[in-house]
Amino acid sequence: MNEEDKQASQSLFSVFRSVSASMFGVQSSRKHEEDFKHGSVGAYIVVGLVATLLFILGVWALVKFAVSATATS
């Protein structure tokens, strides 16, 4: 792996940050282009699926908590 490839590869944190920014709609054009140029498709798919699953579970837990809190009142 040469020096340019080392700079081009993205860390898992960078992929997570890009996926979360995209989910909330605040991804910059520059970062979006950088992701397509240097990112691995597989990493984005896996992180995107995990983030989506965590979001769904979080909403489910919040709704379950809200329903149980109002049912006991």
Image (tube, rainbow, N blue to C red):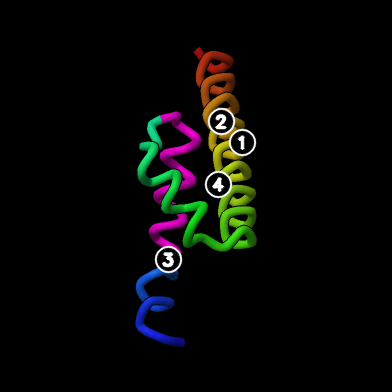
Q: Which residues are magenta?
A: 11-25
Q: Residue at x 39, y 37 (%)?
A: 29
Residue 50 coordinates in the image, percent (x, y): 60, 51
For the residues labelled 1 and 3, the Cα–Cα distance comes to 26 Å
* Badge 4 element: helix
Q: Quadrant of residue 25?
A: top left
Q: Does residue 1 belong to the magenta stretch?
A: no
Q: Amino acid at mark 2?
A: Val
Q: Earlier in the sequence, mark 4 or mark 2?
A: 4
Q: Secondary structure at mark 2?
A: helix
Residue on which the image places disc 1: 56
Asked whether, in this view, residue 48 is left or right of residue 5, the answer is right
Q: Are marks 1 and 2 in contact (CB under 8 Å)?
A: yes
Tag nearer the camera, 3 or 2:
3
The kind of residue on which mark 1 rests is Ile
Query: For the residues marked 3 and 4, what is the alpha-carbon distance in whole angstroms?
Result: 18 Å
Q: Position of residue 73 (x, y in %)?
A: 50, 12
- Nearest the viewer among 33 and 48 is 33
- Could you give the CA–CA distance between mark 1 and mark 4, rounded to whole angstroms? 9 Å
Label located before the other in sequence (3 or 2): 3
Which of the two residues, 38 or 62, is positioned nearer the viewer here? 38
At 54% from the left and 37% from the top, the residue drawn is 58
Q: Pointer 2: residues within 10 angstroms few (<14), some, or many (20+)?
A: few
Give the mark nearest the N terminus, 1 or 3.
Answer: 3
Local SS, label 1: helix
Q: Which residue is mark 3?
A: 10
Which residue is label 2 attached to?
59
Q: Residue at x 41, y 86 (%)?
A: 2
Q: Provide the residue designation for mark 4.
A: 51
